[in-house]
């Protein structure tokens, strides 16, 4: 489940390029009208061309981004199929194109901006500090806790409990315990380094 | 909320992501996994659980292409706000029967979110073929029961390991009231989904209330979900839908932040 592809943005976003060097705040502000354009333009090839130009100008991997954006398709296909079945094939196609281009736009933003810079920029634009701080922590510890979850799963399978509801529940409980203790250690380490315990 | 809660909330977000890797066999060779809203309610205060769920949804939209930025407002409302709130009401209302209370909390957190999402999709112009609505409601009801069973099993494990990790329900609100509230939420969400799937229901209702059809378009716009794009109406409506989604997300996070700033027993 934790395929390496999920962290591919980390390597892309740390490369150098014209888009990488832009202020993250401008990139966030530019993404918004781009998404709105995609979601109301009746001619999806226009924003598509714009995205293509941005990708090539920013020297970003076109194929890799296109593959990332395709992750949105399975979800969209369900609703597109329902719409097509109701006799509106043109609208179904438009729906698919828009969902795909929106996902591509977000992938473009993520591939040119490291997440921590994006979160800082969002906070400076007025997003609640509390939320961005929590997201920093979640992103930082996702791999750590995820690795523990993988170890727990392998351990359960090794002991023959890979298909047991009770063992799975206990594994999640152990994972919770590990996460809780880790959060306590992090907090103590923060206090030891001078965090004041003040309010956000 | 003091700083010590921020690492906990952040790591809990990572925990929910990671816990979704652990599969639960549910018979017939298929398996499911935890969604996490109700479990967070049992471990954190509801406002903190809302912030954690919001963080998870934003990260999913950004990194995993799951959801989408314009739909984020609707998603946060459905899952982080309504889902957590209904789970909290159920958990608190039925706290004297711990396990059934937790099963119910897990169920409503998933079911209410799913029904709201279906309703919003219907309002935004997705026309599901007749019959599929009933099927979808059934599927989400099963998913909800599953979430409830997983939540109760995990909380049972935590209880055996260290009861201090779990919050104790204070039983101040009156269980009957909370139960009533939960039932109302489920009914309202289900009714919303079903009613909005009827082709003319909304317009007839609006007609009775004396609203012209032009106003209905504006009225419906803020509720459009996953790709406001689906709607066939003019571009104004779609733009409004996207902006309303973002506005809703902003308003919600601001509200949650305000709630969390209030002094609170840790």
Image (cartoon, coloured by chain):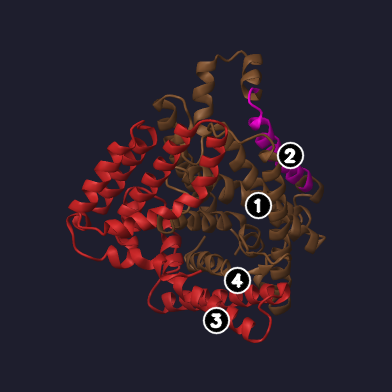
Chain colours: A red, B brown
Per the image, label 3 sits on a secondary structure element best described as helix
What's the magenta bit mostly, secondary-structure-wise? helix
The percent coordinates of residue A28 (x first, y second) are 31, 48
The percent coordinates of residue B70 (x first, y second) are 43, 42
Q: CA distance from mark 1 to mark 3?
A: 28 Å
Chain letter for mark 1: B
Residue carrying label 4 = B22
Q: Which label was assigned to residue B110?
A: 1
Q: CA distance from mark 4 to mark 2?
A: 32 Å
Chain letter for mark 4: B
Residue carrying label 3 = A151
User: Magenta region: which residues?
Assistant: B179-200
Tell me what residue is drawn at x 66 percent, y 24 percent.
B201
In the figure, residue B39 lies in which quadrant? bottom right
Tell me what residue is drawn at x 44 percent, y 41 percent.
B246
Q: CA distance from mark 1 to mark 4?
A: 18 Å
Pointer 3 with pointer 2, Cβ within 8 A:
no
| Mark 1 or mark 4, whichever is nearer to me | 4
Report the front residue among A141 and B239: B239
Q: Earlier in the sequence, mark 4 or mark 2?
A: 4
């Amino acid at each position: 489940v934790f395929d390496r592809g999920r962290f591919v943005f980390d390597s892309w976003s740390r490369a150098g390029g014209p888009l990488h060097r832009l202020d993250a705040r401008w990139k966030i502000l530019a993404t918004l009208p781009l998404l709105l354009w995609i979601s109301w333009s009746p001619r999806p090839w226009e924003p598509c061309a714009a995205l293509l130009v941005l990708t090539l100008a920013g020297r970003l991997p076109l194929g890799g981004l296109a593959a990332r954006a395709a992750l949105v398709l399975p979800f969209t296909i369900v609703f597109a199929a329902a719409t097509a079945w109701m006799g509106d094939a043109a609208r179904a196609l438009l729906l698919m194109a828009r969902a795909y281009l929106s996902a591509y736009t977000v992938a473009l933003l993520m591939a040119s901006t490291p997440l921590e810079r994006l979160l800082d920029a969002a906070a400076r634009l007025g997003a609640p500090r509390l939320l961005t701080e929590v997201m920093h922590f979640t992103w930082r510890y996702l791999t750590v806790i995820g690795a523990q979850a993988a170890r727990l799963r392998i351990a359960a399978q090794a002991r023959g409990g890979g298909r047991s509801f009770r063992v799975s529940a206990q594994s999640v409980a152990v994972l919770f315990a590990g996460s809780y203790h880790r959060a306590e250690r992090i907090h103590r380490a923060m206090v030891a380094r001078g965090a004041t315990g003040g309010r956000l | 909320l003091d700083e010590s809660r921020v690492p906990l909330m952040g790591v809990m977000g990572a925990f929910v992501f990671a816990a979704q890797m652990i599969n639960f066999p549910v018979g017939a060779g298929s398996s499911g996994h935890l969604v996490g809203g109700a479990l967070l309610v049992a471990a954190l205060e509801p406002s903190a659980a809302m912030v954690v769920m919001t963080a998870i949804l934003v990260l999913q939209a950004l990194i995993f292409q799951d959801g989408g930025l314009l739909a984020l407002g609707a998603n946060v409302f459905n899952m982080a706000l309504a889902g957590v709130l209904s789970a909290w009401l159920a958990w608190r209302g039925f706290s004297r029967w711990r396990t059934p209370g937790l099963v119910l909390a897990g169920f409503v957190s998933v079911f209410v979110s799913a029904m709201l999402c279906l309703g919003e999709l219907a309002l935004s112009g997705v026309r599901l073929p007749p019959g599929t609505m009933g099927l979808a409601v059934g599927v989400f009801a099963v998913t909800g029961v599953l979430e409830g069973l997983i939540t109760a099993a995990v909380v049972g494990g935590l209880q055996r390991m260290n009861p201090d990790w779990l919050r104790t329900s204070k039983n101040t609100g009156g269980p009957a009231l909370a139960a009533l509230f939960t039932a109302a939420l489920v009914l309202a969400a289900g009714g919303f989904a079903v009613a909005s799937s009827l082709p003319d229901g909304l317009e007839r209702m609006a007609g009775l209330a004396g609203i012209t059809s032009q106003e209905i378009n504006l009225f419906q716009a803020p509720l459009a979900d996953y790709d406001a794009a689906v709607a066939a109406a003019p571009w104004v409506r779609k733009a409004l839908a996207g902006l309303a989604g973002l506005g809703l997300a902003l308003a919600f996070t601001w509200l949650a932040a305000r709630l969390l700033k209030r002094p609170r027993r840790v």
